[in-house]
Amino acid sequence: MNFNAIYNSIFYLNPEIAVSVFLILIVMLDLILGNNKKLIPYLAAAGIAVAAYFVFDQLTFSGFAFSKILQPTDNFGMITVDVFGAFFKIVVLIAAAFIVLFSCSSKEIVLSIDRLGEYYTLIFGMILGMFLMISASDLILMYLSLELVSLSSYVLAGFTKLHARNSEAALKYIIYGAVSSGLMLFGISIYFGMTGTTNLYLINSLIQAPQINFYALGIATILIFAGMGYKISAAPFHFWTPDVYEGAPITITAFLSVASKAAGFALLIRFIKTTFVVSVNPAGFWQMIPVFPWKEMLVIISILTMTLGNFTALGQNNLKRMLAYSSIAHAGYLLLGLTVMSNQGLIAILVYFLIYAFMNLGAFFIVMLIANKIGSEELDDYKGLGYSTPFLGIALSMFLISLIGLPPSAGFIGKLYIFIALVDANMISLAVIALLNTVVSLYYYVRVLKAMFLDKPNETVLPYRENVYNTSIVMVLLAPVVIFGLYFAPIVEFAKSCVTIFGM
């Protein structure tokens, strides 16, 4: 055992250590304070700020943690620290910061204030698992980190226990999660049996050997993808998403729709890029090891995901459920960037994700504020809300327009770069399918706008008094959606710098 290597690895794990320390502090503060829980959100916000400091520090260096531990000749570690991982950790922290802010205004969480310590402890458990998912370059660590995220989110999905649907959401989530985890672990065991290692970098060199069994490798890869596909809500592994999104507290639904999806995509991209790519040509396209038809499979999965998500959303009358199917459709759009198998496609994914975080969190926050007021998420109860609550109505409209991908919103820029990547790869037919799906999505988003501004108001609708705290959060979320729609060069350059280093 090389203790020097362990000691040196600690430097690369500063964000994970910070999250772990604050997780423990939240538990201790919860025990000390007893029934007084007011300080816990402030401690959680401080923990996110400290973790963000260390993550931004990782934008300037790269390396491996826990290399040369068992064998002095090992060159690669279980954890890869690089700018690509830092980008997705920033997305996770942005989502986590807003969830802390959302929770202070959520009626569901306020009614469960006696368990606020457990609530934030589980959120920090999810953040820790997501950080490890994003940086994992070993199959065992990938599985363990995914399980850490899943176990925390199972509890949070049924946390409030205010309705029967809360427990239903948690039960369905754990059943689907257990099956997908079992499939993934089975795939990992086949990989280990074939190669004798779980390190992705070593597997990359070993699967290039002529004696590799393509059929066994293909089965194992599909099984591992099942576990990752469940986390990103890709069809046909998406069945848990609408029920869990509808049944979970809105704050947790928003967190799962952004942070969990970001970690899942980072895990999938690193798995493909590290294990199956030999080199990157001057044009930025990945030279794949010809042992598994990744491109063909991802094309099928992405078309199935965005088509199923969009068409199923057409008939939804519950806003949370509609946004759940919308989230599935957006996973399909993001997978389009991966089908290209190029640095340009990866840049498109990063740009899309950063924009998606703000517009999706914004939409869920407005739904939460309206639910706090009228006690409903049903579309019929949104009739006339554009007049009784003009600020929230206009803000929600702008977030939905961005989710559609219409100019001049930031959502348009995200989809534009996806289409540019597809055209550069000469995948015109796939771009046309994506465009037609965008047209379909226009219908169910416009239904919400119609209900708010064109339908006759319900008699039960009461005027909404703008709260300075909530209004400020909406404005902070709305600003990037507007600004990046007009001036998007900074996020594109940031994405390019992340991909240039990751895609060497």
Image (tube, rainbow, N blue to C red):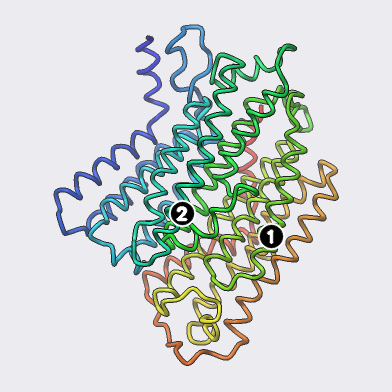
Q: Is residue 436 above or below residue 349?
A: below
Amino acid type, label 1 = Phe
Q: Which residue is mark 2?
A: 255
Residue 105 appears in view = no
Q: Which mark is residue 427?
A: none
Q: Which residue is mark 1?
A: 412
Relative to residue 175, is residue 415 drawn left or right?
A: right
Q: Label 2: few (<14), some or many (≥20) within 10 Å?
A: many
Q: Is residue 338 above or below residue 391?
A: above
Q: Mark 1 to mark 2: distance in Å?
A: 23 Å
Which percent across, then down, holds residue 102? 39, 62
- Name the quadrant of the N terminus: top left
Which percent across, then down, holds residue 406? 70, 65
184 or 58, which lies in front?
184
Give the secondary structure at mark 2: helix
- Name the quadrant of the C terminus: top right
Q: Residue furthest top?
A: 72
Q: Nearer the viewer, mark 1 or mark 2?
A: 2
